[in-house]
Amino acid sequence: MSKSYPEYIPEVVLITGATGGFGEAFCHRFAALGCKIIVHGRNKEKVDKLCVSLDVPTYPLIFDICDKQATLEALNAIPNDFKDVDVLINNAGGALGLDKVHEANLDDWENMIEMNNTSLIRITRTLLPNKVERKKGHIINIGSIAGNWPYPGGNVYNAVKAFVKMFSLSIRADLTGTNVRVTNIEPGIAETPFSVARFKGDTEKAAAVYADTTPLTADDIAETVTWAATLPEHVNVNTMEVMPTKQTFSPLHVERD
Ligand code: 8X3
């Protein structure tokens, strides 16, 4: 007789960047499983509103991911009934700009490193000892196909997502024997506020990214994340690259005279 899944339901899930796009979809999906949710965001009003909409116990976690002190203070103040985080989903981050390397904005580059890498390692390092002590837990990083496949204008965004992938695999190597799981989910083109942020509020440019095709949705990625998180505890999905059916690969570019 074959088993039926999900076999494992986490108790406490912490989602960073939870107030929109993927993060919000993750909140609803884990709430539907009955998990307690720590909802992170920068905007208190948005976080509070989302917490109220979830029909499970929630804890609002408000801080700017680029602020080290605020991050550490907020994480260290998580109350006892939420502090055993079973699943940490490092979802916060994003892209800024799509300019060529010699024209890109240096501040955007530095911000991308801060948002996608520095903050992620800080949060992970702070929450990991609890998981190791309990010999239980799962870190799910939201990477990107951008970390696997370079594309024009991707430059530092591609690089920060490649960092997330290699950091995920490296944490996994260090955590051998601890029973802690690590997964890097690598979505392709997905219709979320991602492109509005990349183009700094230019909604027309953002809409063009998703025009005349069928991109992934936040729900599609929530499905993959909850699948990885609810597999039996002896199963670890290392990486999972997910594209819309209508997105594929191009040949390598050859410059001709
Ligand atoms: C987002 C995927 O292809 O827009 O991480 O860079 S892509």
Image (cartoon, rainbow, N blue to C red):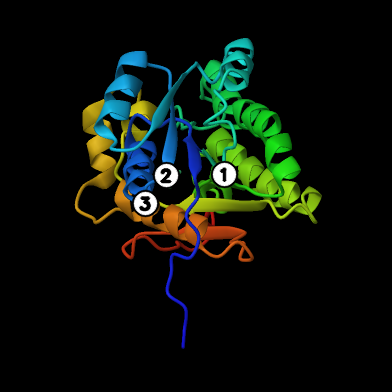
* Residue 86: assigned label: 1
Of 153 and 114, which appears nearest the observer? 114
Of 132 and 248, which appears nearest the observer? 132
Which residue is the site of mark 3? Answer: 33
Q: Are marks 3 and 2 in contact (CB under 8 Å)?
A: yes
Above or below for 191 versus 199: below
Point 47% across, 55% down: residue: 9
Q: Quadrant of residue 162?
A: top right
Q: Circle 1 sits in a helix, a strand or a loop, which is it?
A: loop
Above or below for 211 versus 4: above
Count of numbered tags: 3
The three-letter code of the residue at mark 3 reads Leu
Q: Are marks 2 and 1 in contact (CB under 8 Å)?
A: yes
Which residue is the site of mark 2? Answer: 35
The three-letter code of the residue at mark 2 reads Cys
Above or below for 45 versus 150: above
Point 39% across, 30% down: residue: 58
The three-letter code of the residue at mark 1 reads Asp
